[in-house]
Amino acid sequence: MKSAARDLRSLIKDVQDFPKKGIVFKDITPLLADAQAFADAIDQMAAPFADRGIALVAGIESRGFLLAGPVAQRLKAGVTLIRKKGKLPRKTVGVTYSLEYGEDSLEAHADAVPAGTKVLVVDDVLATGGTAAAACQLVEKLGGSVEGLSFLMELAFLRGRAKLDGREIRALLAY
Ligand code: AMP
């Protein structure tokens, strides 16, 4: 039986003040540990992008990897990794983006996305949108085209969608 959004929501635990004061961390590990809920979440994340010619699903480090793999399997697509700086072993291409304080970088292998490839970007949480926007920029820098983005949840009060203007964004749950 399909898990309703309500059931998925009950498997995401709020952790106050993690990793620092003022942040409510959304812990998805109980959802990942529930076979039915995990499978249903993946089905629902993939469904809007079925039959869209997506050849690659780009997972954002690190929880995005856990979702990108099975979403890619549903879409009969491959998977590629978008990682923090310095983690990938071969030649990389990177993008730098600004955080509330300072900046951060994301990288992919330089040959990760063949020109013209249709890519779906996947992560667990859309918060301020900085990470997802950088991931899209990176895919496009490599020559791919971003067909859309799929998240388990969005923290709508942080208005991440504003940084992804014009892109197709799906999120199973909104807070
Ligand atoms: P942002 O760039 O602000 O949209 O942040 C998105 C990235 O940070 C994602 O990779 C999330 O996994 C992580 N993230 C941001 N906020 C949270 C949160 N409240 N709980 C869990 N993960 C978060």
Image (cartoon, rainbow, N blue to C red):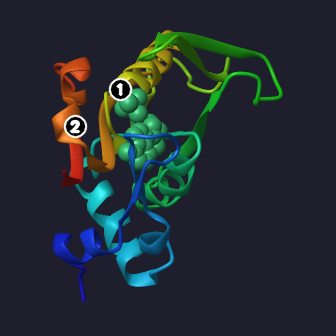
**Mark carried by residue 146:** 1
Residue found farthest to the right? 89
Q: Give how far across and how far down residue 110 sits, in percent.
A: 67, 17
Quadrant assignment for the N terminus: bottom left
Image check: 169 left or right of 42? left
Q: Give how far across and how far down residue 144 sits, in percent.
A: 45, 20
Q: Alpha-carbon neighbours of circle 2 within 10 Å: few (<14), some, or many (≥20)?
A: some
Residue of label 2: 169
**In the rendered image, the vertical position of residue 127 relative to residue 11, given as above or below:** above
Task: From the viewer's side, name the closer residue of 143 and 95.
Answer: 95
Seen at 44% across and 48% down, the residue is 17
Q: Give how far across and how far down residue 102 sits, in percent.
A: 52, 10
Which of pointers 2 and 1 indicates the residue nearer the eye?
A: 2
Q: Earlier in the sequence, mark 2 or mark 1?
A: 1
Residue 134 in view: yes
Q: Quadrant of residue 14?
A: bottom left
- Residue type at the position of mark 2: Ile
Seen at 32% across and 47% down, the residue is 151
Quadrant containing ligand 1 reads: top left
Image check: 141 left or right of 62? left
Disc 2, disc 1: CB below 8 Å? no
Residue 58 in view: no
Seen at 48% across and 21% down, the residue is 139
